[in-house]
Amino acid sequence: MSPQSRGRKQQRGGTDRGGPPGPDLVIARAVRDACRELDRIDDPLIAEMYVSETLGVWWGLHVVDADPEVIFGEALVAKAATTRKPAALGLLRCVAVLGTERQRRAAAEAADALAAGGVAEPAWAGAVGTGRVRAAWAYGDVYGDQTSVLLAVERSGVEHGVVVLVDHTLGGIAKDAFATPDPSGVLGDLRGFAGPLVQVRELSVGEAAAMLYPAFAASDAGPEPPVSEDFAANRALALSRVRMLGPSPAAAPGPVVGRAERQMIVNGFLAAPAGRDLPAQRAGAPSCSSSSARRRTAAGRCG
């Protein structure tokens, strides 16, 4: 084999300097860089912000016939699991809070395995993912185009917050998000902007969850959503705080219609012009299951 053909064969393996690096090289670099950076960090929030930014590198990336959360995100977990360093264990602890459901599960198992094998935990790792949402506020104008939601999170006596901008003119997507070490200061700024056309109001945990879960789902659903430049970097951290609100609220079921009310609706429909010409065999009241009754339309039909 000539030196030229040997070089071409190596380049086909993903080392061609003229093309983009392959997933394996991207992940190796990401874990190496994360270990270097996390070694310098002594604050759990800063660690989470760094890992959130790392996970945001491939968020929304389009890969033909592949899921970037698998070829990059899950590969990151697998690579860190084989790296016997405290910083790699810290990286896994962060992904166990910030990643997708599959990434969180795999990262937690890998982190526990490293710890059981004698790898030391970073001092900040035990605080990652802990805390509670102490309060939530909404800020927006009376026209309802956009709403900013501030979540104040208390952790070991120290507060931090996240702010999420929900754009209702774009289908209710989460358009921007950022973390702040001073939620009280942000709230003070928002209250300073309040006026006849701008409102600041406190939200219950349920109200905040009902607004934010669908907002992040909408941002994740569309190709190339019109989000801010920094949204991808902050998304995982902000969404982890939304999960502190509790499970995603289920859609409220429709009203349950009793038999007497249903019969009145049917009789009214049959007496109307649209129902008068129905065949005789359909003139009786239709039989609706309890599930179909929940999907009854305003016209009285069973779905």
Image (cartoon, rainbow, N blue to C red):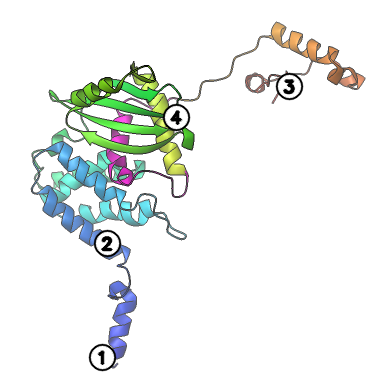
Which structural element holds mark 3? loop
Which residue in the rendered view is the most extreme toward the front? 196
The x and y percentages for residue 55 are 29, 48
Can see residue 286?
Answer: yes
Residue depth check, mark 4 versus mark 2: number of the one nearer the observer: 4
Q: On the rendered structure, is 157 left or right of 284? A: left
For disc 3, the marked residue is: 301
Q: How many marks?
A: 4
- Establish if 116 lies above or below 155: below
The C terminus sits in image quarter: top right
Q: Residues within 10 Å of mark 1 (few under 14, many from 20)?
A: few
Q: Residue 231 colored magenta?
A: yes
Q: Mark 4 points at which residue?
A: 145
The circle on residue 3 is 1
Q: In which quarter of the image is residue 248?
A: top left
Q: Can residue 248 be seen in this view?
A: no
Q: Identify the residue at image location x=21%, y=42%.
A: 49
Q: Nearer the viewer, mark 1 or mark 4?
A: 4
How many residues crowd around disc 3 within 10 Å: few (fewer than 14), some, or many (20 or more)?
Answer: some
Q: Which segment is the magenta one?
A: 222-249
Gap between marks 1 and 4 measured at Cα: 63 Å
Q: Which residue is drawn at 32% across and 30% down?
A: 242
Query: Circle 2 is placed at which residue position?
Result: 26
Q: Residue at x 61, y 14 (%)?
A: 256
Secondary structure state at the residue bearing disc 1: helix
Between the C-alphas of marks 4 and 2, the distance is 39 Å
Disc 4 to disc 2: CB gap under 8 Å: no
CA separation, marks 3 and 2?
56 Å
Question: Residue 218 in the image: x percent, y percent?
Answer: 45, 38
Label 2: state its secondary structure. helix
As displayed, is residue 73 above or below residue 255?
below
Question: Which kind of residue does numbered mark 2 sit on?
Answer: Val
